[in-house]
Amino acid sequence: MTDETADQTYSNGEIRTIALAVIAGIFFGGVATGVAFPTLPLLDEKLVISAVMLSVILSANRIARLFMNTPAGTIIDRIGSRKPMIFGLFTQALAPFGYIVGLHTPPIELGAVPLLGGVSLPGLVFVTARLFWGVGSAFVFIGAFATITYVTTTNNRGRWVGYMRGGQSLGFPTGLILGGILTDLADMQTAFLVAGALALLAGTVATIVLPDVHAGAGGEGRSVSLREVPALLADNPTVVLVGYGNFAVRFLWGGVILSTLASYASVNGLELSFLEAAGISGIVMGLGVLTSGSLTIVTGWASDLVDDRTILTVPAFLAMAVGFLVIAYVPTIEALLGAIVLVGGGMGAAAPSLLAIMGDLTPGDELGRMGGAYQVMGDIGLSLGPLLAIPAVESWFGYQFTYVLCAVLVSSCLTIVSLPLLRNPEVTRTGVKAD
C-alpha cells in the first residue's frame, strides 16, 4: 500500500490509539471465544445430540467465516472499517448469550439427519449462535487488518501488525484457562455470561475509541463472492504466494498439531510427573501458544528494521520443518517440548511477516477484499487440517510419516513463498513497485 495518505494524516500518537483499540477488541474477543470453548465439548448429552452434531457446532463458526470473508472485505472497502468492525464485535457478542438460551431450551428431539445423527432444538440454537460468531469474526479480523494497514506506514506496519496478531494469539488461550476455571468453580452459564460480557466490552471499547479510518476507500468496488476468490487471486499472483504461506501455517498449526498432539502423546506413552496424554498435550500446546504469541510481537517489530520482510520467513519455515521432523523421529517428552517451541515459534515468526507483506502489496482501496481472500486461504487450512490429520495418523500413514509430510509441506513454503518474493526485484520492504 502506498504510504502518502497515512504519513500525512496519522501521527504516531494517533496510530498508537487506533491500533490499541483494534488490539483490545481482538484480544477480548479472543478471550470470549476461549472462555466458552472448554464447555462446548461437554454438551452432547445435555443437548441430546450426536457426536457428529457436536462437531458441527464446534466448526460452525469457521464455516460461516469462510463464506463471509469476501463479502465482509467488499463491505469494508465500500464504507470503511469502523462500522463493520463494530458490527462484527457486537455480532460475536450474541454467541455466548445464544449459548445460555440453548442451555435453557427444552431438549426437544427434532429427529435424525443423515450423516449428522440426532438433532435437537437446543442443538440448533447452539449452531445458530456459533454461526453468528463466525459472521462477526470475519468483519473483526478483516476490519482490523484494513485499519492497521491503512493508518500505518512501511516503517511501522510490521510492529503494529505483530501486536495485533499477538493480541489475537494470546486472547484465545487466556480465555481457555479462564473458561475452564469458571466452569469448575461455578457452572457453564457463568462461563458463557463472562464470555458475553467480555465480547460486549470489546465492542464498547471499539465504539468509543475507533475512528472512521479507511472510509469509503473503494466505494465503487464490485462485490466478490467466495467462488470468485480464485479469479481475484489470479489477478494478484504475488498475493497468492503470501496466501499459500498463510494456508500452510494455519493447516499445520491450527489443524494438524491441535488435532493430533494428545493422541500422539498417548500412543507414544509420554508422561511428565503425574500428567499423562491429555495433561501433557495441554502443557505442550500452552508452551507453543506462548512461544508463538511472543515471537509474533518480536518478529513484527523486527520486520520494520530489515530491508525485506520476506527474509524473516526463511528461518520461520525452517524452524517449523525441523520441529515436525523432531516430533516424527524423536518421540520423547523432552524432544516434544523443544519441537513445539520450534513449530510455535516458526508460526509466530511467519504470521506477522506474511500479513505485513500483504499490507505492503495491497492498494488502499482493496484492503478489505484482499484481506478477505487472504483470510479465506487461512480458513481453508484450518478447516482441512482436522479433517485430514486424524485419518492420516490413524489410518493412512501413521504418526511418523504424517509429521514428515508436514515438514515437507512447510518446506515447500521456502520455494513457493520465500524464494519468489526475495527474487522479485519489484517487491521490497516498502512494498512500492519500482518505477
Image (cartoon, rainbow, N blue to C red):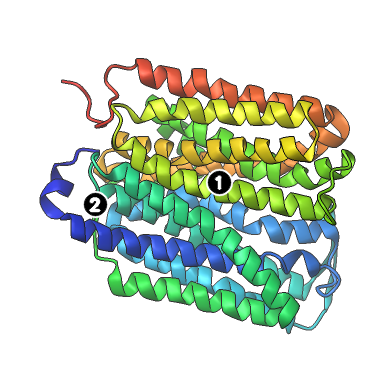
Q: Is residue 232 left or right of residue 17?
A: right
How far from the left and from the top, in percent, is residue 344?
59, 41
Q: Amino acid at mark 1?
A: Thr
Give the residue at the far front of this rendering: 273
Give the quadrant of the C terminus.
top left
**Residue 424 x %, y %:** 33, 17
- Count up the numbered dots: 2
Q: Position of residue 331 (x, y in %)?
A: 80, 33
Residue 258, relative to residue 241: is it above or below?
A: below
**Res. 291 mark:** 1
| Residue occupied by mark 2 | 151
State which mark lies toward you, 1 or 2: 1
Q: Residue at left 82%, top 34%? A: 393
Res. 269 image quadrant:
top right
Q: Position of residue 337 (x, y in %)?
A: 69, 41
Residue situated furthest left in the rendering: 8
Residue at 53% across, 62% down: 30
> Counting residues from the N terminus, which is met first, the one under dot 1 or under dot 2?
2
Left or right, residue 146 beside residue 69:
left
Secondary structure under badge 2?
helix
Count residues near mark 2 (Cα–Cα under 10 Å), then give few for <14, some for 14-19, many for 20+: many
Residue 216 lies, with reference to residue 44, above or below; the image says: above
Reply above or below: 334 against 177. above
| Dot label at residue 422 | none
Quadrant of the rendering where the N terminus is positioned? top left
